[in-house]
Amino acid sequence: MDELEDLLIEASRDRNVEIEIITARIRDQPVYKTFLNADLFRRMLKQAPNIKVYEEPYKYLHMKAFVIDDGKYISLGSLN
């Protein structure tokens, strides 16, 4: 995750890429129950304050993503 955060920080600061992250405030995995997702983004938000993170306060979210950068895109999801 540190490497991904570094890449997002670099893209935001150096290339002025707009980055928005949508996540759940809570986690369903028992090992992570004590962590809020906001805590996991703290370093990234401090180093690149124009990155926006939105948290859903009451629901668990199942990972899906669509990223667009300079005419290139990637779609991430699950097969279930």
Image (cartoon, grey):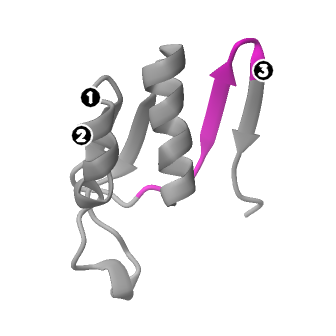
Distance CA(mark 2)–CA(mark 1): 6 Å
Residue 42 is situated, as x and y percent measured from the top left of the image, at 25, 50
Q: Secondary structure at mark 1?
A: loop
Q: Which mark is residue 49?
A: 1
Residue range (magenta): 61-72
Residue 18 is situated, as x and y percent measured from the top left of the image, at 46, 18
Tell me the crowding category of disc 1: few under 14, some 14 to 19, or many 20 or more residues within 10 angstroms, Cα based: few
Tag 2 and tag 1, C-beta contact below 8 Å:
yes
Instruction: Specify the farthest residue to the bottom.
Output: 31
Q: Residue tagged by mark 2?
A: 46
Image position of 30 (left or right of 36): right
Q: Quadrant of residue 47?
A: top left
- Residue 48 sits inside the magenta stretch: no
- Residue 68 sits inside the magenta stretch: yes
Q: Quadrant of residue 20?
A: top left
Image position of 80 (left or right of 28): right
Tell me the crowding category of disc 2: few under 14, some 14 to 19, or many 20 or more residues within 10 angstroms, Cα based: few
